[in-house]
Every structure is written in C-alpha cells, then in structure tokens.
Amino acid sequence: MIDSIIIFIHLMSAGVGVGASVYCLYLLLPRFDKQEQGKALDEDSITYKLLDALVPTVFVAMLMLVGSGIYYLMENYTEQVNLKDGYYNIFGIKLVFALAAFFLSVYLTFGLRPRISNLDLKPKEARKEVRPTLDTMRLLSQVNLITITFAVFMGIYLARF
C-alpha cells in the first residue's frame, strides 16, 4: 500500500512539473507577450507574475519527485536484484536528467528569482535587470522542461523492467 502512495506522489509530481511548465511557457506567456511588447516590465506585468509563480511550483514538484524516488528506492532495494540487463544503464541516464532538472530548478528559484523579487526595495537598480532576468528565466525554464520530460520518459521506459 505504501508503495502505491509513493508511486502516486512520484507520478503526480512529474505531472505537475511538466504540466505547469507547458501550460505557462507555451500557452500563457506567448499570449501575454503580445500585449506587453512595448511596455516596461515591472512587478505588475503578467510575465513577471507568471514566472514568479511557475519557478517555485516546478521546484516543489522536483523536490517531491526526487524525494519520492529516493524513498521508493530505499524501501524496495532488495527487490531490485533480479532486474533485466540494461536497467541500471537507463536508470543512470534518468538520474542524470532528474538531477539536472532539480539543480536547474534550484538555480531558477534561489538564484534568478531573488534578483527581481525586491523591486520595491531597490527600484532603480533592479528595474533595468527585469527584462534580461525574465528572458533568462524563460530560457532556463524551457531547458528545465526538456530535462524533466526526458527523465519522465526514461521512467516510463523503466516501467517495463
């Protein structure tokens, strides 16, 4: 029963990470970019608010994904002795993508997001950093989406073992 709950949490975390990224990056942001093309981006812009909400959401999803994966491995390590050849090769590739996505999420949440989160406290210095930081956040969020997607597909492929 506990394995089913852990697998459910693992799958839901993957779904939230991929789904929120796709929805925000490919459905919402292109639509609102057309409306904000000539305007200066600040804390009231839709692009700012969307990326400000997306980045921590994906970080928490990645945290739950990595945590539930590690917990599942620790609970079921004795059952993984008789797996088919090639399982650990694919699992290693999955881990590389999952860890890359996790550290990208950490950098986005704790590295880039604080640069522009205090616009009220330092308005003159931070306003000129908003557009380049948001562009970097968008690009790295797309890279993060790709790495999460590869990790998810590797996990789906591993289910056949």
Image (tube, rainbow, N blue to C red):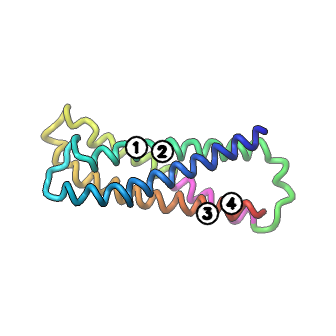
Cα–Cα span, label 1 and label 2? 7 Å
Q: Residue furthest right?
A: 82
Whether residue 78 sits left or right of residue 32 in the image: it is right
Cα–Cα span, label 2 and label 4? 22 Å
Residue 31 is drawn in which quadrant? bottom left
The C terminus appears in which quarter of the rendering?
bottom right
Residue 114 image offset from top left, x and y in percent: 32, 40
**How many other residues sit within 10 Å of disc 1, few (<14), some (14-19) or many (≥20)?**
many
Read off the magenta span.
87-101
**How many other residues sit within 10 Å of disc 3, few (<14), some (14-19) or many (≥20)?**
few
First in sequence: mark 4 vs mark 1: 4
Q: Are marks 1 and 2 in contact (CB under 8 Å)?
A: yes
Residue at coordinates 21% horizontally, 37% vertically from top-left?
A: 119
Q: Main secondary structure of the magenta part?
A: helix
Q: Which residue is mark 2?
A: 59
Mark 1 lies on a secondary structure that is: helix
The N terminus appears in which quarter of the rendering?
top right
Amino acid type indicated by mark 3? Phe
Residue at coordinates 67% horizontally, 61% vertically from top-left?
A: 156
Amino acid type indicated by mark 2? Phe
User: Is residue 89 covered in magenta?
Assistant: yes
User: Is residue 66 covered in magenta?
Assistant: no
Amino acid type indicated by mark 4? Phe
**How many other residues sit within 10 Å of disc 2, few (<14), some (14-19) or many (≥20)?**
many
Residue 35 image offset from top left, x and y in percent: 20, 56
First in sequence: mark 1 vs mark 2: 2
Residue 74 image offset from top left, x and y in percent: 74, 43
First in sequence: mark 3 vs mark 2: 2
> Which numbered dot is residue 109?
1
First in sequence: mark 2 vs mark 4: 2
Q: Which residue is mark 3?
A: 153
Cα–Cα span, label 4 and label 1? 26 Å
